[in-house]
Image (cartoon, coloured by chain):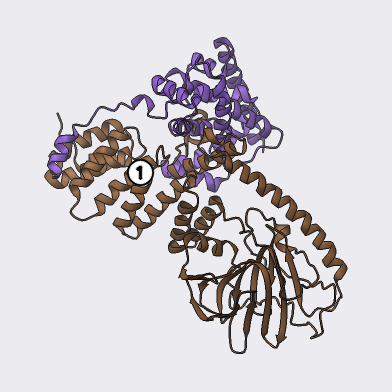
Chain colours: A brown, B purple
Amino acid sequence: MTRRAMQVWLTADDSLDAIRSARVWARLDARLAREGDGAVAGVPAMRARARRFAIAGVAAAVAIAAVAALVVGSGRGAPTADIAMVAPPGGVMATTLGPYARATVVGPAQLAIAADAGSATTVHMTAGAVFAEFDGGRGRSLRIETPHAVVTIVGTRFSVEATATATCVAVAHGRVRVDTPTGTTLIDGGSRWCSDHATAPLAPSERARLDQFLPPPVAASEPVVVPLAAAAPAPPPADLVAPIVAPAAVPAPPAATAASASAITTAPAPAHPVTAAAAAPPPPPSAEQLYERADTALAHDDAATADRLLATVVTTAPASPLADQALYERARLAFARHDWPAALARLDELAARTASPLAEPALYLRCRVALESPGHAGDAAACLAGYRRAFPAGPHDADALGHLAELAFAAGGCDAARALTRELARSHATSDVARAWLARCPEAPP
Amino acid sequence: MTVAMVFAMLALVPDPGDADRDGGTGTGAARPPSGDRDDALVDRHLANDPGAFVEIYRVHAGGVFRRLTRLLGPIPEREDLMQDVFLAVHRALPRFRGDATLATLIHRIAINIACEHLRRRSRRPADPIDPAFFDELVGPMLDPRELTALRGEVVRVFGCLAKIKPNKRVALILHVVEGLSFGAIAELAQCSVDAAAKRVQHAQRELDALLARSARAGGDR
């Protein structure tokens, strides 16, 4: 009994599936890269350097947040009318823009928020990037003024980025109006406009940035934090400091910490307009972050979002092992929705990658696509045979044999399937597939 | 292509991967997966071929995971420990002289890391096995009566095993669960065959004593 107990417990769950294997590899690869040996692990040494910069950025953000906490603390009780913000390079701040908008400000940024009257809010932004969700409605307005344009938001999820040379607006949902000295432009969801470019569809990398920094959608019953509601309509003091309340669930980018996301640096309100240094683009989300978000979306049965995020992983981090995993997951998602061409396209992409740890399940999935596609029984059989040749000890070998037996059975009954059922009984005697086939096509007694 | 043509082509090729069926680790060092392939992979890795280590991982990951499961049980830390194993392999490869096979090197490292994990764990009380987790994992393999009987036995046995020193415990498991000979255990644990045999015998005696004590304590209650 003791021996049996040991054997049962120590052999339970002892097979490494492809997803788990790829997950371990992704983390291992990251650790190898951190050791500064990226070239050997198939990761450019650049990634290790990027991580070191990210760490330095986090340290700087923490230091700034600490200073900010002191400044904010010392400023409590001061009258608040406008809010001035200065975000350091790489700094990320969660804030509200008036009563109806929640935003993430990515530094380097410099902006001032003014409550004009009632529910109207104007933001003067000289530099930086704002990713915001505005809950529009009757009498509510949000206007963002940059050196190059006035952006009027009706109700949407959007971003505005201002640099010394241009202003860009990206819209995830809804519509935004932009007024420039040369005219007015309406920007619809899924589009991006820049003061020095025409309107264009959002590129995957831009959509990924929106996904990274936009505050999560507000539930209808969730109150929006309103720092300006109680503000007296008085002129701003010289050294203005205002409390900013951070939404709880703002996603933190790699170079930011929880501290930097919930605390801000403050500074005297800049005169408007202010000539600012060019804003450096914030770091893009890492493949790991995107993948985690895709996992979360899948956990909520949001396959469309998961698919989009996984596509972004492949686009933005093609060298990452997570890209293999993302391609495989995308193929599985396409398979689940019976989109055979899409599944095959993803599998083709995966097959083109050398030494992918997911080559085995990908080939098996390809065979399943062939099995499911009407009129492709011959292709399916060829695929399964190829799978067995390529991965003779593959974890799907019994299933592959079972499918082959099924195809043979359809062509000529038990006699046609006999060789395969015998092979099943020989190689996978204890498997359910073998048992099922032996019950279906029993061996004749000698 | 018709189904009949495909089946004519099939001819059920003999399985060249039999030796590798479990990632070349079924009986540890005694049966290397494919010495030539591993040698070539090591050579490629040492020549800075970026794909070689991925391939080494791909070939051996399943075996390492299985080995860790058999030494430690289905614990959640296995994935982290797998990373530790391959990280250590990566560090060790530049000094690898080919005295043993690559599979042996990898499994020696896996065993060392498993022992180290057990040592760390021994400094704090053993986590009891969650019955719900046990049922979820083992339930589909057993009939309900056996499941009930084994559930209690597993808790009791692993409570006692946790009190045995890691190197003895590992030797016992390699012998009892994996069926390795003393020679194979000696090769993996890097000790003499006598020492391996003694570890197994001592562990077995200690386990028997602990189980007997546990049974008496259960009877007293």
Q: Amino acid at mark 1?
A: Ala
**Is B133 placed left or right of B23 in the picture?**
right
Residue position marked by numbered label 1 in the rendering? A351
Residue B122: x percent and y percent?
A: 68, 32
In the displayed structure, does residue B63 sit left or right of residue A257? left
Q: Residue shown at 86%/70% (left/top)?
A: A75
Residue at the spot x=52%, y=25% of the render? Answer: B106
Of B150 and A343, nearer the camera is A343
- The reply to whether residue B177 is visible in this rendering is no
Location of residue A441 in the rendering, given as x and y in whole percent from the top left corner: 19, 41
Q: Residue A165, image x and y in percent?
A: 61, 67
**Secondary structure under the numbered disc 1 in the rendered image:** helix
- Residue A108 in percent (x, y) is at 69, 62
- Looking at the rendered structure, the number of numbered marks drawn on it comes to 1
Q: Quadrant of residue B11?
A: top left
Q: Is residue A161 above or below residue B67?
A: below
How dense is the environment of label 1, judged by Cα within 10 Å: few (below 14), some, or many (20 and up)? some
Q: Quadrant of the C terminus of chain A?
A: top left
